[in-house]
Image (cartoon, rainbow, N blue to C red):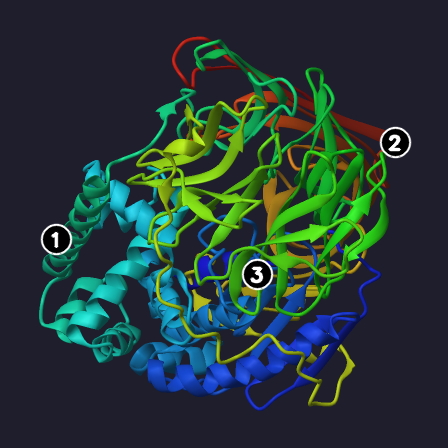
Amino acid sequence: TFCLFFILSAVPAKAADPRFEWRSFETDHFVVTFPRGYEAWAGRVGVLAEKAHDLLTLHMGWTPDSRTHLVITDYTDMANGWATAYFRKTITIFAVSPDDVSELSDFDDWLWGLILHEYTHILHMDTMSGLPRLVNRIFGQVWVPNSVQPSWVLEGAAIYSETRFSTAGRNRATYYDMILRTSVLSDRLQRLDEISSAPIPYPHGSIPYLYGSRFLWYLANRYGEDNLRFMSADYGNRWFPFGVHQSARMSFGRDLDELYAEFVADQKKQALGVRDRVRARGVREGLPLVSQAESTFYPVFHPTRPRELLYVGHDGHHPNALHHLILDGQGRARSDRVWESNVFEAGPPAWDGDRAWLHQVEYAQRVHLRNDLFRAGPEGATRLTENARLAFPSIAGGRRVAVRLTGDGHELVALDALGRVNRVLLPAQSRRRIYGPRLSPDGRRIAFSMTHEGQRDLWILESGSEWPVRITDDPAMDVNPAWTADGRFVVFSSDRDGIYNIYAWEAATGRIARVTNVLGGAFAPTVSADGELLVYAGYTARGFNLFIMPFVPGDFLPAAPSLPVRPDSPHRETAYPLLHDVHPYRPWRHLAPLAWFADYGFTTADRFSLSMMGFDPVELHAWSGGASWNPVSREYDASLYYTYNGFWWPLDLALTLGDQTRSNAIFNREWYEYDYDWYKLEATVSIPVWQRVKRYASTFFTLSWNEGLVPDRWPATRPDYPLPSIPESYSRLAAKAGAWYQRTESSTYALEWETGEYLSVSVEPAWRSDTAGLRWLGSLDGTLRRKLPLGQHTVFSARLRLG
């Protein structure tokens, strides 16, 4: 177990942005580290983390005995964070808020919810007593019993906290209600053993979060949340893992299987109640338009051609792609062509004549994952911007607008024909997040969804105006606005009655009407240019698919009253000042050994072994070292490894040395044992040449020096025996250079990449003192894969290796 932890502890070499100037400050219970320019984020993190500490230590019944490190990073435009209690308690926070529509979108204060979630992980994993606590006192934080609980327990506890101590959270999210309800009604609810193992069915990696959060929420409401705390404490005292059923019996007095059966029965009761309510009003939904059914989203009709639209999606068996769809006169799919494959985290396309603009996440400057704009057509897509952090482009009436992500929030900006920002239409403000702007057909108005002071509503910005007008004002999630071609309606999705449905806002009167009444959920509406057809992304138990139905304003239903207003977050997204002394980040202060391990015969047979490691919270520096010694033969070896991740390219250094007994010398017709000493020093630098999400090329250079030493004195040789065979000391100097290229495509259900190419080459000239001249070594490794029309995942693979 300990060896596994040390293997996992190695900090991988990774490129970094050397322009980041890291800063740091301490609070009573945290150390906050952030890049210069994110002082506002850091100030809020410091204050909110201390508030979370006060609440969660009481809730979890545990107080850590050391500070937790909070690292704010700006390497990605995808909202998330992560926490670990191994070696050093650390939370990493991505300085960006969630995307348009996802399980994370329903929040009152994103940063507060994120800190609640991740700090619950820290307290949950850090809860321990007995033998695990004693071992960690000696060797460092290497034994964390609660971390090996099923992931649904870990994530369920964190989501419980983010909901319990905020006015939002995923346990209140209609999005989670939708997934569970459709699973129940289609008899696809996951069993306890399924959610406790690797999640394969849709929604895949969200299964532990979804089921764990709702299961623990049910248990807390039925049996009291104290039992959750008892369960965490009991498991944290166990020296042997995987006894979660025993901890549940100790806490709830019942087996998890029985408790889960109760939870399933409760979910069925709730789902059937919603089904009956929807059916009583009359189900109103479209017909499936395409065969995709997993992540098919963002349909957009052409502004003038009423039977032509684009959408983004995949079925789990093919890569995510931008599709061009043409309908026949009956509204059925006539052709479905891929314009661009391998799109990653893409948003809604915006028609630009016969082409389209869209945003997706792609590498910028080799190390940053950024939202950038692309222009796509039948021949594929070309990149318009790099590191611009632009999303949700919209084009109409000779104007182009988009949302720009900044350190302060979201800006609504105007673009030129090349995707360059030429004007800020709506500047960033705290507590303001802008999503999915859509220009009216004449280009004079912009409709968009905006989170403002904890509430997600629709707004319209008139041309020339400096402040938008709110057109919906309710606690619902109002998302995905789109204009009809005549400018009469803005259609959008809203969960105002507990289910996401399509609604229409009439521009002339301001009245809101319901268009659909579905059992699952309806999102991202778009209306054909002739105003006859509505296409939307509908949720089913197998994922999202496109649905089509007539768009008839005369058949609209009255909009249901919105659900009761929930209170705003008590931790408003205000700008807290930096209340503590800020100083330059000093990574060397954190490079003392974090963990060490000593054993006899476990790491290496018949040897005493010692190993240790350390790294700083930002992972600019990482090191590990080890040594072993055989008390019988007196052989030993030692190693020291160091990685520096502060450049555009990472640098690795390695020093190894040792002494061993060899017996390859012959004296007087007998094998002779002698001491052989060796040393090796190696330096490697990896330089990304071309970095993309699914395509990359890189080079590496390694310089190494070896020395092998044999004794200077040997036994005397008898004159009547053959001459001895004596090895010589030597020095070896080598320089190795290599490069590799990879272009791959994969899918959700693929075991690994299925289509593409991989090629690596290397050459190494080496000089050795005991041989003449240079010795050249080389290698070539290439792999070619193509999918075959024999089942969904039958792949032809060919590999060539030369050396």
Which element is circle 1 on? Answer: helix
- Indicate whether 221 appears above or below 756: below
Identify which amino acid the numbered label 2 is placed on: Leu
Which element is circle 2 on? Answer: strand
Q: Between marks 3 and 1, how big is the CA–CA gap? A: 35 Å
Q: Which mark is residue 451?
A: 3
On the image, the x and y values in percent for residue 223 come to 16, 73
Q: Is residue 647 visible?
A: yes
On the image, the x and y values in percent for residue 415 come to 82, 42
Q: Residue at x 63, y 70 (%)?
A: 71
Q: Residue at x 47, y 84 (%)?
A: 53
Q: Quadrant of residue 777?
A: top right
Mark nearer the N terminus (2 vs 3): 3
Frontmost of labels 2 and 3 is 3
Q: Is residue 609 visible?
A: no
- Mark 1 touching mark 2, by CB under 8 A? no
On the image, the x and y values in percent for residue 281 come to 23, 42
Mark nearer the N terminus (1 vs 2): 1
Which element is circle 3 on? Answer: strand
Q: Between marks 2 and 3, how big is the CA–CA gap? A: 66 Å
Query: Label 3: how many residues lie within 10 Å, few (<14), some (14-19) or many (20+)?
Result: many
Q: How many marks?
A: 3
On the image, the x and y values in percent for residue 29 come to 55, 87
Q: Which mark is residue 265?
A: 1
Mark nearer the N terminus (3 vs 1): 1
| Residue, disc 2 | 774
Identify which amino acid the numbered label 1 is placed on: Ala
Q: Between marks 1 and 2, how big is the CA–CA gap? A: 75 Å
